[in-house]
Image (cartoon, rainbow, N blue to C red):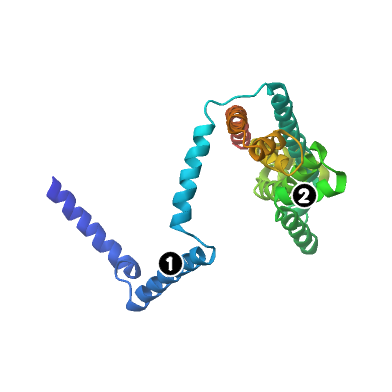
Amino acid sequence: MMSRTARLTDVDRGRLAESYPDVFRPSPWQRVKALTVIVALVGMFLFGMVWLGFSFEKLATGIGRLGVVVGLMFPPSSGGLLHLYLKGLAETLAIAFLGTMLASLLAFPVAFVAAKNVVGQRILHFLSRRFLDTIRGVDTLIWALIFINVVGLGPFAGILAVAMSDFGTFGKLFSEAIEAADTGPVDGVTSTGGSVLHEIRFGIVPQVLPIMLSQVLYYFESNTRSATVIGIVGAGGIGLYLSNEIHQQNWDRVAFLIVIILITVAAIDYVSSRLRFALIGRAVIAHD
């Protein structure tokens, strides 16, 4: 039995070699190109490490210091500031939720303009896509620094930063979902004499809305972590307390803050995952 399997495998391999000679018997020029690419990548990696000052000595010393810091984190302690930490955590969740919702509401109409199957004008489609790419290309932390100087310190700047960053992302994702929508329901609405707005409302929106909601839930989970980071630069939330405790080297309190952040993110991840799967399942059933 084993020899027969081996013979069949050899035959299959021979057939594959005949069908794809470039893969099984690459030419010397292809081997030289592959080797050149590998050498170039390794060279770039080594150059980057040297240029940026990588040092095994610094790494060993840093690991030793990290071990000391980790030792000082145990046992985690709130230091009697639990009520302040919970307030900061609530601000972080509010920043993530409000920023995500604001971004999705703003991106929803723009996504239809950026979708090829809704707006056929190439110039308008091109400009809207490039506009979304520009907004999306700026990181949330940069937007936070900008809005802190515009509206001042606090959660409001954090909400605007999250909303601005996600606006570009949602616009791109929503428009792609619209472009991937089935044309059957749209044609059905058209055949009954429906207008363009009717086609969008009854032909496209029912298909893409569960997908959009699933994406919004995922980014709410992700923005909970982002809201923590932007709080460090003054955009409010629990990140501000985390930054203060790190500067004061209160490592037991830092550990406590990290623990409650991890628990919160894990809980949101669990709930949002269940909701996303439910929404995707409904979208598949509706499509069928």
Q: Position of residue 222 (x, y in %)?
A: 64, 39
Work out whether 276 lies above or below 116.
Answer: above
How far is mark 1 from mark 2, CA to CA? 36 Å
Residue 82, picture quadrant: top right
Q: Residue at x 49, y 33 (%)?
A: 71
Give left or right: position of 9 versus 136: left
Looking at this view, is 215 or 95 the one in front?
95
Work out whether 85 lies above or below 8.
Answer: above
Residue 244, picture quadrant: top right
Q: Position of residue 195 (x, y in %)?
A: 83, 45
Residue 182, picture quadrant: top right
Q: Secondary structure at mark 1?
A: helix
Q: Position of residue 185 (x, y in %)?
A: 69, 41
Label 1 Cα neighbours within 10 Å, binned few <14 / some 14-19 / many ≥20: few
Q: Residue at x 20, y 58 (%)?
A: 10
Work out whether 153 lies above or below 44.
Answer: above
Q: Which residue is mark 1?
A: 42
Label 2 Cα neighbours within 10 Å, binned few <14 / some 14-19 / many ≥20: some
Q: Which residue is mark 2?
A: 145
Indicate which label's residue lies in the foreground, 1 or 2: 2
